[in-house]
Image (cartoon, grey):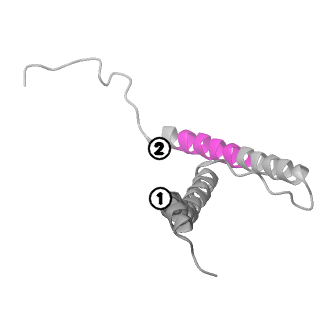
Amino acid sequence: MAIAPIDLQTLFTQMDKVGKEQTAIKDGTALHKAIHGEVQNRKIEERMEGVMEAEQTGEGLSGIQDDKEQRRQQNKKKNNNKNKESEEDAAAAQHSIFRDPAMGTHLDLSG
């Protein structure tokens, strides 16, 4: 089948539209990949900057509460022991150091 001159005339007028469609298809895939990459980068940044949810353990959230309570009790015991030690040290220091009641009340300027 031969191509008639009228067919060529119609094809030549449509060539600019075909070229634009072809470039849009080629650029569309690259644009789609770029947009998809940006979305993935945003998700990763949100995960890195955001607050992570606590993972559920077999005990559930009650296990976390128990751990906090144990830490509080241990801290109280440590503080009580430190207070007792500091009181004993202070009492021992007062007995071992001689303090003059008149010290610091009179100044001798005669040199």
Is 26 situated above or below 109?
below
> Considering depth in this image, is 94 or 63 the residue closer to the camera?
63
Quadrant location, the N terminus: bottom right
Q: Which residues are magenta?
A: 77-92
Q: Which residue is mark 2?
A: 96
- Answer with left or right where residue 66 lies relative to residue 25: right
> Considering depth in this image, is 7 or 74 the residue closer to the camera?
7
- Answer with left or right where residue 85 lies relative to residue 23: right
Residue 30: numbered disc: none
> Considering depth in this image, is 83 or 96 the residue closer to the camera?
83
Residue 16: numbered disc: 1
* Mark 1 element type: helix
Residue 85: x %, y % from top left:
62, 47
From the image, give the main secondary structure of the stretch colored magenta: helix
Q: Can residue 23 be seen in this snapshot? A: no
Q: Earlier in the sequence, mark 2 or mark 1?
A: 1
Quadrant location, the C terminus: top left
Residue drawn where x is 61% and y is 50% of the image: 46
Is 84 situated above or below 102?
below
Is 4 situated above or below 92?
below
Q: Can residue 25 be seen in this snapshot? A: yes
Q: Label 2, label 1: how many angstroms apart (C-alpha)?
A: 104 Å
Residue type at mark 1? Answer: Asp
* Mark 2 element type: helix
How many labels sit on residues? 2
Residue 26: x %, y % from top left:
53, 67
Residue drawn where x is 60% and y is 40% of the image: 87
Residue 28: x %, y % from top left:
56, 61
Residue type at mark 2? Answer: Ser
Where residue 10 sits, quadrant-wise, is: bottom right
Q: Residues within 10 Å of mark 2 (few under 14, many from 20)?
A: few
